[in-house]
Image: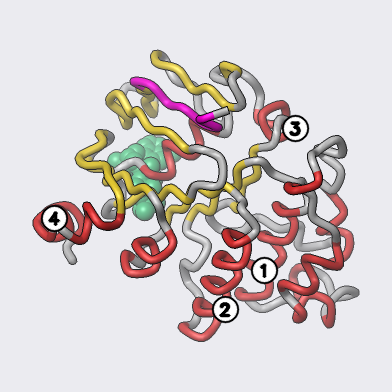
Amino acid sequence: MTTLLQLRDVTTAYGSIQALFGISLDVAPRQVVTLLGRNGMGKSTIVKTICGMMPSFSGSVRFMDREVLGLPSYKIARMGLGLVPEGRRIFPNLTVRENLVATMGLRSGAPAESRWSVDEVFDLFPRLAERIGNGGNQLSGGEQQMLAIGRALLTNPVLLIFDEATEGLAPLVRAEIWSCIEKVKSRGQAILLIDKNIEHLMRLGDQHYVIEKGHVAWSGTTAGLRAAPHILSEHLSV
Ligand code: ATP
């Protein structure tokens, strides 16, 4: 398979207000692809459309060689789409252990290379092991984010989407989350990464899409982005 995820001319709207105007993008196996853009440009709307949380009235979203537009989120998740959602959305009244096992085994037949164990998640985040019996609502923001990532990994995703995983965290905790994303990448995990930190995105990403008012304003490699400073200044205020 050369492409895990393929969007072609995807459009969508919130009621009568159109938010996406023909988005096309690709994620290949083992690739890290980023969505860049200022606030309100449509990045989270793209994520919601891919995950089946938002209808699209035209275009195509193919995941694992299958059209997924119109499928409910849980079916797309079972096919191997993992999401670390904006705002974390962990279960506050469940313990760390219960949060982790809640969606475990969603893809029990996953191939070995995309299978994660609880121990591997604890190796990645030793802090979660220390807090295993604590409730989700007793965790710091950083720990909650680690839990959201661990929970997504334990679904054994083929493709993992991080939607603003470092948002609202203290600088030291952010650094920890970036280093974890790097470790996940080093296992060959395909990732779609949305964040505001352009330097980290350029360091980790293989391919980048700059989103402007619901369109792809530019796409290319990190070298291409570094060679086009006007893209950064025009679309990203860098
Ligand atoms: P941010 O980084 O702030 O999350 P974003 O690039 O992810 O921004 P989106 O959240 O996808 O942007 O928003 C794209 C457009 O859709 C914006 O104009 C926004 O105001 C609008 N929008 C987003 N969510 C809703 C909603 N629930 N109802 C109506 N309009 C919405």
Q: Nearer the viewer, residue 2 or 89?
A: 2
Q: Which amino acid does the dot numbered 3 rest on?
A: Arg
The residue that mark 3 highlights is 78
Disc 1 marks a residue whose amino acid type is Met
Q: What is the CA distance from the residue labelled 1 to the residue labelled 3?
A: 22 Å
At 32% from the left and 29% from the top, the residue drawn is: 20
* Label 4 CA crowd tier, 10 Å (few <14, some 14–19, many 20+): few
Mark earlier in primary sequence (4, 1): 1
> Disc 3 vs disc 2: Cβ atoms closer than 8 Å?
no
Q: Taking 30 as reference, is 34 left or right?
A: left
Residue at mark 1: 146
From the top left corner, tell me how far across and down residue 183 is, in percent: 61, 67
Q: Which residue is mark 4?
A: 228
Residue 171 visible? The answer is: yes
Labelled disc at residue 176: 2
> At numbered mark 4, what does the secondary structure look like: helix, strand or loop?
loop
Q: Residue at x 47, y 53 (%)?
A: 193
